[in-house]
Amino acid sequence: MAPEGRTHNGSGWLYNPNFNPDWERRKLYGLATWTNGMAFREFEFSEVGRPIIKIAEIKNGISGQTKFTEREYDRSYLIKAGDMLFCWSGQPQTSIDVFWWRGADGWLNQHIFKVEPKPDVDRLFFFYILKYLRPYFIAIASNKQTTGLGHVTKVDLERIEVGLPSKPEQRAIAEILGALDDKIELNRRMNEMLEAMARAIFKSWFVDFEPVRAKIDGRWRRGQSLPGLPADLYDLFPDSFEDSELGRIPRGWRIAPIGETVDVVGGSTPHTEESSFWDDGVHCFATPKDLSQLDGPILFATERKITDSGLAQIGSGLLPVGTVLLSSRAPIGYTAIAETPVAVNQGIAAVLCGDTVPNYYAYFWIKENLDVIRSHANGSTFLEISKGNLRRIGMLVPQGPTLRRFRDLVAPLFRRLADNLTESRTLAAIRDALLPKLISGELRCLLRPCVSIR
């Protein structure tokens, strides 16, 4: 539903959002400096240098699709960690939004504003103003949408009127919302660390074979502990290598097609958009888009829900908790572990693990071998790894006791990670409920200890 607003200046509700009538009315564009990014040309790209920051980098970080350049440009186009970025062009529902840049220094691409509020505007408060205005921005862009793209232009920003309280009240509002976001960000960083710890164990044991090498070199002996290699792990690892079709591997371990060690299944979508398949749906229905929007390795919920009658149309049915999900097309590589029973569409390969290979091992094996998986993909319109091709890829299968010990070490890390994600989802819901009420001035009682309010 479109947001409601005043029309006191005759320019329509889109340009007159609701704000407290006691607050000063100001034009949005005049409250900040807006620096639009550059239009880069192909010949400016290079293998190294600073990244060119587009909406994809803002949402998903630096990736294999990121462009780089060694050229130098006007410093006004250089963005650094902590800069406020407003994406004003793209698919309205998914692209138009405000973000904090958290990555490396880079050059700003066109269709994105770097935003710096004026001195009389609290920087964090202005960020939340833009968040509050997002439904208006989406409506403005949708009204002008062509070929899938919509825009919020400088002219639109000059027309939008907002309410601005005193600087102390701005700070008080920003502190309440910022405290919630700070905790969410802390949880995100902690989860990055937890996943990195689990991945480090995987890489040490199953990629670099560090325990085996330490035994061969004589650096690790029975009853001895080394950093990352406690004495009780000693008997879990061989003390020599042997040849395999994928190179030298620890003796007694084996290479087997993925399809022989786990079940790889594909999904589908009901042939029609019948309302009985979707309305009042109760089962999670995952697509690559759901995986792309995750802030971590665990899938709790999906954008769409499917009904029992819709589920009956999908060959794979409802997959259990713990299923490893891999986007198999456009692009290949988004990966997660389902924390809820889930059905999947045709863009996802689902890996069901049993006693032979734990799901944590399969998850990190996929992450570590994405280049191999992509090399088995094909397609003229976009690359896709078929379920059959995926099943044929050789997977390293260590001995059972080693895999079980890896599972036992990693499981508590993922439990803590899941708890953090659950807490962050709750905090985000509280923030999202408070934000429009605080930014509009509808709710001011929370601020009485902070500022004097008439």
Image: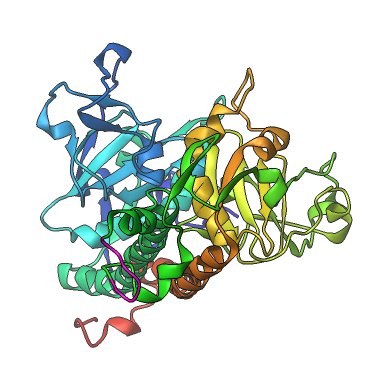
Q: Quadrant of residue 361?
A: bottom right
Q: Position of residue 286 (x, y in %)?
A: 66, 52
For this rendering, which residue is in front, 82 or 204? 204
- Residue 31 in magenta stretch: no
Residue name at image x 35 percent, y 49 percent: 98
Quarter of the picture holding the C terminus: bottom left
Q: Which residues are magenta?
A: 219-225
Residue 69 vertical placement versus 254 (above, below): above
Is residue 417 visible in the rendered image? The answer is: yes
Residue 410 as seen in the image, left or right of residue 255: left
Q: Residue drawn 50% across and 44% down?
A: 94
Image point (54%, 63%), residue name: 403
Question: Magenta stretch containing residue 220, yes or no?
Answer: yes
The percent coordinates of residue 429 (x first, y second) are 48, 71
Mark count? 0
Instruction: Name the main secondary structure of what is drawn in magenta.
Output: loop
Please state the horizontal and vertical placement of residue 332, each as a whole percent of the image. Answer: 55, 36
What x and y, as percent, mark residue 273? 81, 43
Q: Is residue 443 above or below residue 406?
A: below
Q: Nearer the viewer, residue 451 or 243?
A: 243
